Image (cartoon, rainbow, N blue to C red):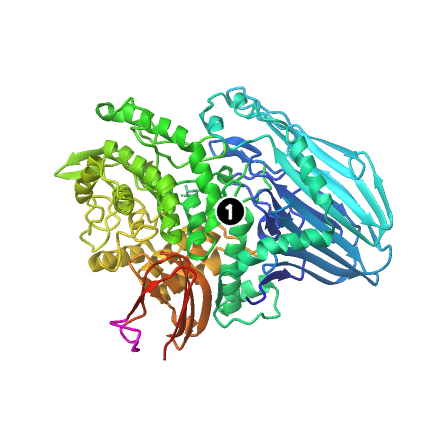
Amino acid sequence: MKNYELWYEKEAPFGYENIACFEPENIPDEGWENWSLPLGNGYMGVNVFGRVNTERLQITENSLSNPYVLKKGGLNNFCELYLDFGHEHVENYKRGLRLNDGTAYTTYRENGVDYTRQHFTSYPDKVFVTKLSSSAKGGLSFTIRPGIPYVKPYLNEEGDGMGKTGKIETKDNVITLSGIMEYYGIQYEGQIHVAISSGKIVTKETTIEVTQADSAVILMAVGTNYKMESRVFLEKEHQNKLAPYPHPHDAVTSIINEAKNYSYEELLERHKQDYCPLIQRASIDLGGDKENVPTDVLLEEYRKGSRSRYLEELYFQYGRYLLISSSRPGTYPANLQGTWNCYEKSPWSAGYWHNINVQMNYWPAFNTNLLEMFEPYIDYFKVYRPLAEELASDYIKHHFPENFSDKAGENGWIIGTGGWLYKISGMSEPFTGHSGPGTGELTSKLFWDYYAFTMDENHLKDTVYPAILSLSRFYQKVLISQDDKLLAKYSASPEQRQNGVHYHTTGCAFDQQMIYENYHDTLKAADILGCQDPYIEKLREDIKKLDPVLVGESGQIKEYREESHYGDIGDHHHRHISHLIGLYPGTVINCNTPQWMKAAEFSLNQRGDESTGWSTAHKLNTWARLKKGNRAYDLLKMILSKCTLNNLWDTHPPFQIDGNFGATAGIAEMLLQSHEGCIHILPALPDEWSNGTYSGLTARGNFEISVTWQERRVKTLEVLAKSNGNCRIFLGDEYKADCIKDGFITFTADEGQRYSFGLS
Ligand code: FUC
């Protein structure tokens, strides 16, 4: 893999201190959001500012949260770590983030002394590590001064305490931050341990002073008493949710004590051994050169039309980096901001939003070879599922009492749009929401794709099939029979409005397509597992009546059954393209349904390209699925030019990580697809990418694919089979070779084998 690095010749602006409060109408913390560089190990996120006078390191832990009430509340800033150096007149300044080894750095010279800082977050050791050094003996002096933002008591409208307490104590080179977030009774603790080589270290009341050291190593660990368990979701009384769980002090102490056993070099080595193989699994080379231009300048030039291939490659790898940093097995899933938040009231609470956003987070897990990064969501699902079953029962009891069953689990499960670590939402009673029940399948599609990419039959049997079968039970109960069709009775195309109010209907495309996909995947799974059941036979009949895709009089995919021309109902340019959900991430609209593909193209053109970050990323994926490389590339250009901040974070605005993840998956989708019963090489190659290589992109069937191409023609192709199975690869009719028949290479693959093909 090439060297991929974000780097800058100026420090990140300081941003706000202790007053950052994001509300949609407020100005975001510009220094944090636009310029700081993110590190993360799933357990914690760190934003590094690279400042010389006072460094700002901002820390996030995803369970430290208030509930979301009317655009307020949500994830809280864990703490700030300020390092006071007092440096002001520096030269040779540089800061950056190296994607190859997951480390950040700041270097500069002051008064003839070279100062270096290196930072990383370690997944195996669960700590944030910083090493500071100076080129002059005893040249390093600074004070560590932590801050706990937003410590204040306040009550919500119901009179519940929503405030936060916080105290800072020091003892023996350790600073301990601790307090309580009142609403859920979250007890939190962070510990900062400082060690120096030579020089002097003085522990003060709330700070630690280092003078005349050669170097210093700072370790930090964080924790709360949160536990991702079903009882937390089922417990209705907010104060009781965490009551049984112990204070995090012992856990945090043991993380620090264990990390202390290693030298800095050992910790770094352990981090690299964990991280580097993951980032190296997949790479794309479009011929970009690592130009000697800072990332913000590269981005600015890109906006002006100078399209750096290196920036496109970097952006792709950065999406993979962000997923590795925010969602690792055993941690919580990546939220709307991944695992980075500096606010008291985070945008949309930094929640798990299920009408597109959280699912988009995981799209690149599948096709960019980061499958296990999805595991935290599977764990999350297993934990919230009992509540999702309760919500399904409540909904059916209210709206379809005739279909209600009092047998446990018989009503299936459902998740509405909102999800957090403390609760999830269902469909409302009465139905007032802005998204129909398709949100359930948009979620379980991920489980199906996880199976399709891993071919893990145990996972299919133990997790996927039970989940999708149970969801199909819910769907079966919320469909009504109308004109010999089965239609979702309470149905809404996410967030569309008519005359200012959310538009509710029967059988909109979003719900019908998602229910269709759910039935389809359930039947496929039943066939693979050999499950025969009268219920499955009923699904086989019912799926024929779902009518998931309708073409209207303008030639559009109808968003609503009652619409005749494009845009009759709802916003013409709405950011959600929910009626095309069957094109991506669904598969019901595909190359075997050419009329639907044509209608989807028409609808996409009507919707227009310009939109918010994640929406642009969704459109990139749909254009890739339509096999229109140049149009997909238009969307990628738009993402980089209009929806990308200087630290390459996606902006909705504000910063949302979903756009990064969606676009990363979209880039892979331009180069490799596998949803149409075969592996399609270079399905949506834009003219600008006429030469290139990629390696380690993943395809359904559990294959890793590596390709080189020149002048838009595939030259070499390598398949690594990670499971036994049939491998069917589509290159195109124009390829002639002994191994190719009608444009396809077909063979039976053995697990562990590599298959190489040279094509002229
Ligand atoms: C969905 C979107 C919004 C925003 C929010 C977090 O509701 O429609 O644009 O991204 O999620």
Q: Depth check: 174 or 451 in front?
A: 451
In the rendered image, residue 42, in percent from the top left (x then y), is placed at 56, 44
| 169 lies above or below 626 | above
Give the quarter of the image for residue 683.
bottom left
Whether 708 is drawn above or below 482: the answer is below
Residue pictured at 30% horizontal, 58% vertical:
605
User: Which residues are the magenta region?
Assistant: 733-743
Evaluate whether residue 435 shows in this view: no
Q: Is residue 287 at all visible to an observer of this figure?
A: yes
690 within the magenta span = no
Q: Who is closer to the viewer here, 718 or 247?
A: 718
412 is higher (above) or lower (below) than 611: above
Q: Provide residue 22's location: percent of width, then percent of height.
A: 55, 39
Q: Residue 122: x percent and y percent?
A: 63, 48
| Left or right position of 284 against 167 | left
Question: Considering depth in this image, is 105 or 76 the residue closer to the camera?
Answer: 105
Answer whether residue 740 is magenta in the image.
Answer: yes
Question: Is the N terminus in the top left, top right, bottom left or bottom right quadrant?
Answer: bottom right
Magenta segment main secondary structure: loop
Q: Secondary structure at mark 1?
A: loop
- Ligand 1 position by quadrant: top left
- What residue is disc 1 on? 654
Query: Considering the image in quadrants, where does the C terminus appear?
Result: bottom left
For mark 1, does the 10 Å Cα neighbourhood hold few (<14), some (14 to 19), or many (20 or more) residues? many
Relative side of 222 to 470, left or right: right
Mark 1 C-beta closer than 8 Å to ligand 1: no
Q: Nearer the viewer, residue 563 or 523?
A: 523
